[in-house]
Image (spheres, coloured by chain):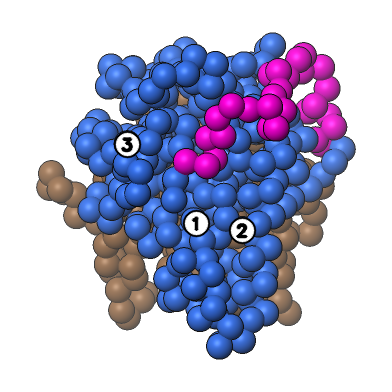
Chain colours: A brown, B blue
Amino acid sequence: MPKTVGVLALQGASREHTAALEKLGANVLQVRMPEHLRGLEALVIPGGESTTISMLLESSGTFEPLADLISEGLPVLGTCAGMILLAKDVIDGRPDQKSFAQIDITVRRNGFGRQIASFESDLKISGFTTPFRGVFIRAPLVQSCDPSVETLATIELDGGGQSTVLCRQRNVTVSSFHPELTDDLRIHQMFLENLD
Amino acid sequence: MLRGGVIMDVVTPAEAKIAEDAGAVAVMALERVPADIRRDGGVARMSDPVMIEGIQEAVTIPVMAKARIGHFAEAQILESLGVDYVDESEVLTPADESHHIDKWSFTVPFVCGATNLGEALRRISEGACMIRSKGEAGTGNIVEAVRHLRSILGDIGKITQADQAELFDWAKQLQAPLGLVQEIAETGALPVPMFCAGGIATPADASLVMQLGAEAVFVGSGIFKSEDPAPRAKAIVEAVTHYQDPAMVAKVSRGLGDAMPGLEIGELETKLAERGW
């Protein structure tokens, strides 16, 4: 049975996520309003501008019902802005910016710098036999992870040390990079396989 | 990551805050909005770095700034200031009558205007990583934006129907690289995101251009030349998200006060869209 997966389509890279999930055989629905949440087996929160998405979640009345679904166990994949929207603590966000607070990490918004500091890097991801090309655009920087969070990939920081770029806790998986911007479908595939 | 969003022209840090509060995905820092450039005349140039830095400090969203067509020194300055995108813009007075900036020689991404597909592909071949249909900036009149969008997307549609031999002629007619024309024939889309600018003044305008195929919108004078900018800014953001839902666009269009005063295209002394080649 194909899985019914929602892609939050308020703003950002919803089209690329939709294409990736459809290639893997999922039945994809665009989510803009609370009524679009019915019947979803999983949800993707794409990259975009987290402040904009946060405002639109609120104004469309989608924030509360979606928060309930995630805390009840709806599997969610959040990329870039999606990571910020799912993180427990956000640094350098706007004071009125809301988060679902469903994964025990602290992220710094634009922690890798401005647009001009965007970069790509080959990532070693736990469970993958070959590297995954990570595209980082004004990416959030994970500053700390609770021990209960399973880190799946890290990156070496310029100033020394490492930072988590892909991790998972219960039903929530987040990445600071954009898996939807490459042709490599392995992260979406892993997400769909974990639904079974 | 700007898709489905609104990029707003701002001339002060205070306006930039209003734009961010309203849900803008980016702001365009400039000294005067197009309506004022049109009114005041004279040479319009890159903004003072102090003003751009003030706006960078005021907001957490990306900051774009404009350089004159062909003025690569202005673009170098903007890159050194750390702006997130440079707009090589016809709204400013062109600095070079035949050459656009070689955008491949920069790290900062560029957005460029286009009135037709040939212009869009020439900009992409020079290294632009986003295209916006030009429209006619500072008029509050959507008609030119619609013309440019329909022209670009109409020609893309025709190219997807053309056979291999016809693609050579398309490249010749458009004065565009054959490789890009062949790519469009295969994918049915520009190789970079296609946004819309120039004349958007209402949530309905935003819905119109999104339905025609724009992937995001730039609003210049349309917000801060209107009677009540903050609610209008938010309404246009909502309209871009919910552009396929007329009831939502109707809801956000209520009670916004007066839109910016509009101008008839036939009565303009200067058509900004004709700048660029």
Answer with left or right where residue B63 lies relative to residue A18: left
Give x and y (percent) for residue A164: 31, 52
Task: Give the mark nearest the N terminus, 2 or 3.
Answer: 3
At label 2, the amino acid type is Ile
Q: Which residues are magenta?
A: B248-275
The spot of residue A96 in percent (x, y) is 54, 22
Label 1, label 3: how many angstroms apart (C-alpha)? Answer: 19 Å
The answer to whether any part of residue B147 appears in the image is yes
Which quadrant would residue B60 be assigned to in this image? top left
Query: How far apart are the alpha carbons under marks 2 and 1?
Result: 8 Å
The residue pinned by badge 1 equals B120
On the image, numbered disc 2 is attached to which residue? Answer: B152
Which dot, 1 or 3, sits closer to the camera? Answer: 3
Say which of A140 and B270 sits in front: B270
Q: Could you tell me the amino acid type at mark 3? A: Ala
Residue B201 position (above or below residue A135): above
Tally of numbered discs: 3
Secondary structure beneath label 1: helix
Q: Earlier in the sequence, mark 1 or mark 3?
A: 3
Q: Which residue is mark 3?
A: B95
Residue at (77% x, 35% y) in the render:
B204
